[in-house]
Image (cartoon, helix red, strand yellow):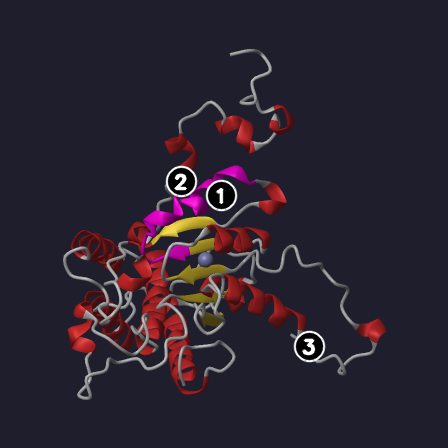
Amino acid sequence: MNDQSPLQPPVYIDSPLAKYWDESVSKLAAIEYREIQDELRERHRIYSLLLMALVHQNWNGNKRKNEGEYPWREKQRLANDTYRGGDYYGHNIGSLAVDGIGEIIDFDFNHNDLFNSSVEHAESRLIRRVFSLTQIYDNWETREPKDLPRSTGYSTVLSSVTIYTSLESCSQCAGIMALGRVKDVVYLQRDPSMYLIGNILYNLTENDLKAPYPIAAENFGFEYFERLNNSYAEFKREVKNKPFHILSGKKDDKSPSITSFLCTDNALAIYEDAAKEFLSYQTNYRDYKSQDTAQPESKVLTNEQCLIHAKRFFDYAISSGQRGTPHKL
Ligand SMILES: [Zn+2]
């Protein structure tokens, strides 16, 4: 090898990339673990349960349209020999944005099929909407131009926002969240095909462009995380013997796709358990207020207020939540 090896990092010498240049990939992809206190664990649990309840409420497993056989969906079969769900707008993946005081800003779903696109993911749709909402926080007619507050620019807009997403983010969504300066991203299931891109981006960014800190839900004892991961591993093993979809005249769908898994009875049962827990949940740390915020302390919601707020949001989302875009209403 000569001295001009392309493996030298000349232009990145002062960047985080240089720090990892001679390290193993495992170091680049691993995230420094942060202990989460019980009170904050509960707060993450409340929003994570809400998100699973929203996905459960909007469940649709007809990924290969409402025809043919779905051997993994016997419990979703209806009397007329079709399956629960109707038209398929996108995958059973949702996201929720929560601000620094604990108020929910909005939610969104994957809508790949509705837009006939592979990029209409829940997190990227949600980030775009949250940016739009921050531009209309005040009616344009209510003040004279000279009285409007000076723009603080967009770079800090989401710096107190946590995104809860039901599936670990892809490179598009991890990138959009980094550009949006999102504070933390909590994910409720691993996506092994996304090669820990959220962790890698977090390690490779710094200062004003720091990517959100990724929090796997297992870090706050969210048992649905392991259940979903194990159930998906089983689906991956078994789908070659038991196809996801069978339609006469076509090749059986035996793909170990994670979005196919997210249509199955096994996945639905896990989401159903979480939805039930959400509806009956009572706080153990009712007076706790998050410390990890730049917000005025008087405005920060307690865990009990978070739970009331989350349940109200759920009622709103299932009755008239047109601001977010659920799969069906
Ligand atoms: Zn994505």
Query: Left or right: 170 with respect to 9?
Result: left
Label 1 element class? helix
Point out the stretch of residues depicted in magenta. Answer: 186-205
Judging by the rendered image, the residue that carries numbered circle 3 is 138
Chain-order first, disc 2 or disc 1: 2
The image shows residue 28, relative to residue 319, as above or below, that is above
The image shows residue 169, relative to residue 306, as above or below, that is above
Rounded to the nearest angstrom, the CA distance separating label 2 from label 3 is 39 Å
Q: Residue furthest top?
A: 2
Residue shown at 54% from the left, 31% from the top:
17
Residue shown at 18% from the left, 51% from the top:
237
Judging by the rendered image, the residue that carries numbered circle 2 is 31
Q: Give the residue type that dot 2 points to.
A: Ile
Task: Locate residue 319, reporting x and y percent.
Answer: 41, 87
Label 2 element class? loop
Front label number (3 vs 1): 1
Residue shown at 85% from the left, 72% from the top:
146
Q: Quadrant of residue 303?
A: bottom left
Instruction: Using the rendered image of the protein, determine whether residue 182 is visible from the camera's viewpoint.
Output: no
